Image: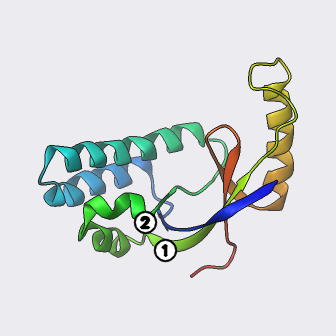
Amino acid sequence: MKYIGKEDHLMMPPLSKLVVTQALYDMLFQYVLTPEKEKNLLDFINRIEVHQKSNQYRSTPFSLPVEELQFLEEGIEELKLLCWQLVPVHIFEIDIPALPSSEDYDKAKDQIEQILTDLFVFNWQGENQILVYSTITI
């Protein structure tokens, strides 16, 4: 593992998909005043849905860097009112001992994931980076 750095993220509270999606549509669209902001908001909501579908068997948090959410402007404060938390997230690069194109890649990645799951709460970010969440609540 190679330490990449730290970011401040807003982390979604553990709510059901329907509640989260509906609240975001109802609340955040009032801050969308341009086509670019609407595209960013729809992308944000889609990322939540993809996360929830891909993590249905593993309970991991969803978060995004505060910088990526700046398009929401005052909407960031609305997220905090919906119990989204500002948390430190540490980024690590994982050296997987197989090429992504090789047959052994998925097996090696699964083995690494099992070990990491025993150590801390994390999410994959791309093919070889993870976001590690602090166990200390802010």
> Mark 2: which amino acid?
Val
Q: Nearer the viewer, residue 23 or 76?
A: 76
Side of 35 where 115 appears, left or right: right
The single residue placed furthest to the left in the displayed view is: 33
The image shows residue 31 at horizontal and vertical percentages of: 17, 60
Q: Secondary structure at mark 2?
A: helix
Are dots 2 and 1 in contact, CB under 8 Å? yes
Side of 7 where 17 appears, left or right: left
The image shows residue 26 at horizontal and vertical percentages of: 20, 55
Note whether 124 is above or below 13 in the view shown.
above
Q: Is residue 90 visible?
A: no
Q: Is residue 135 visible?
A: yes
**Residue at x 15% of width, y 43% of height:** 35
The image shows residue 5 at horizontal and vertical percentages of: 65, 64
**Residue at x 35% of width, y 46% of height:** 45
**Residue at x 38% of width, y 40% of height:** 46
**Residue at x 24% of width, y 51% of height:** 25
Q: Which residue is under mark 2?
A: 66
Precedes in sequence: disc 2 or disc 1:
2
> Mark 1: which amino acid?
Leu
Quadrant of the rendering where the C terminus is positioned: bottom right
Side of 103 where 29 appears, left or right: left
Q: Secondary structure at mark 1?
A: strand
| Label 2 – label 1 distance at C-alpha | 8 Å
- Assess disc 2: are there few (<14), some (14-19) or many (≥20) residues with their C-alpha within 10 Å of its C-alpha: some
The quadrant in which residue 111 appears is top right
Q: How is the image coloured?
A: rainbow
Q: Nearer the viewer, residue 14 or 79?
A: 79
Q: Which residue is under mark 1?
A: 86
The image shows residue 126 at horizontal and vertical percentages of: 61, 40
Side of 84 where 74 appears, left or right: left
